[in-house]
Amino acid sequence: LPLVGLKDERTQVKVKNIVFGGNEVILMGGPCAVESESQMHEAAKAVKAAGGKVLRGGAFKPRTSPYSFQGLGKEGLYYLEEAAAEQGLLTISEVVDEKSLELMVDRVDIFQIGSRNMQNFQLLKLMGELRRPVVLKRGLSATIEEWLNAAEYILAGGNSQVILCERGIRTYEPSTRNTLDLSAVGLVKELTHLPIIIDPSHAAGRRDLIPYLAKGAIAGGADGLLIEMHPHPEAAKSDGDQSLTPDQFNQLSEELVPIAKAV
Ligand code: PEP
Ligand code: MN
């Protein structure tokens, strides 16, 4: 892998006024899916109040079941964009194909490639050509090597703005939705020059465990966190069980400050 051996010269991914892989830990939060204008408005206020820099919200949702909520599409992108702009936040949203990419290209700051699409090589090639910041999530059952090869597809196309995201992998353990592979942080730092962030939400699948995983991630050297937070998790159309309330998100952010300072 060309990524290997370049670890001494770390890549910093700059997105407007923030830097992934610099000295600051980047906090990103928001709902799994964009559901309404008021939901995004409340979520954006909560992210801003907690010191977060990026608002998340999926407009195109690659759901496990075809009968689950599939996202608001174009309308959702609009709510995400408006809410973030109001609070001076950047945005991250999942791209699923060429059509969604066309709709997102001038509206979203960071393009998320989801676990289910980690080996969608056509999509990876499109992101290589686009030269915009990409958060590449680790596949549901992908090895580190498969994940890094997926990143290589984007880099090989000429886009160096790649941020890796560990979000838990499938194991035999049923107590959590996935198992957070915290060694991914160290491995990515040893094997590559890319920034790495942690998504504790999809790893745990339950909100009570998020603070444990988030704190471990930052203590362990992660460059940022992508956390699901919903103004009313009990009413969420997707991933409500793993979504923090705004208060919990704010509290976690406060508790992360001394940890981030210590690393
Ligand atoms: C998400 O971020 O809501 C999502 C679908 O994540 P993942 O691709 O990690 O399952
Ligand atoms: Mn989700």
Image (cartoon, rainbow, N blue to C red):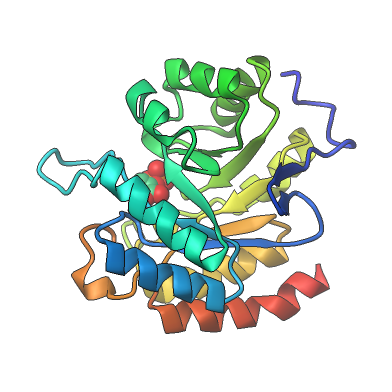
Q: Residue at x 57, y 67 (%)?
A: 214
Quadrant where the image shows the C terminus: bottom right
Q: Residue at x 45, y 30 (%)?
A: 118
Is residue 59 rendered to the left or right of residue 160?
Answer: left
Question: Observer-nearest residue: 217 or 30?
Answer: 30
100 versus 21 height, above or below: above
Label tally? 0
Q: Is residue 243 visible?
A: no
- How far across and how far down the image is residue 202, in percent? 40, 55
- How far across and how far down the image is residue 206, in percent? 35, 68
Q: Residue at x 24, y 46 (%)?
A: 71
Q: Residue at x 49, y 65 (%)?
A: 86
Q: Quadrant of residue 144?
A: top right
Is residue 182 rendered to the left or right of residue 9?
Answer: left
- How far across and how far down the image is residue 199, in percent? 50, 55
Question: Observer-nearest residue: 230 or 187?
Answer: 230
Is residue 177 rendered to the left or right of residue 237?
Answer: right
Quadrant where the image shows the N terminus: top right
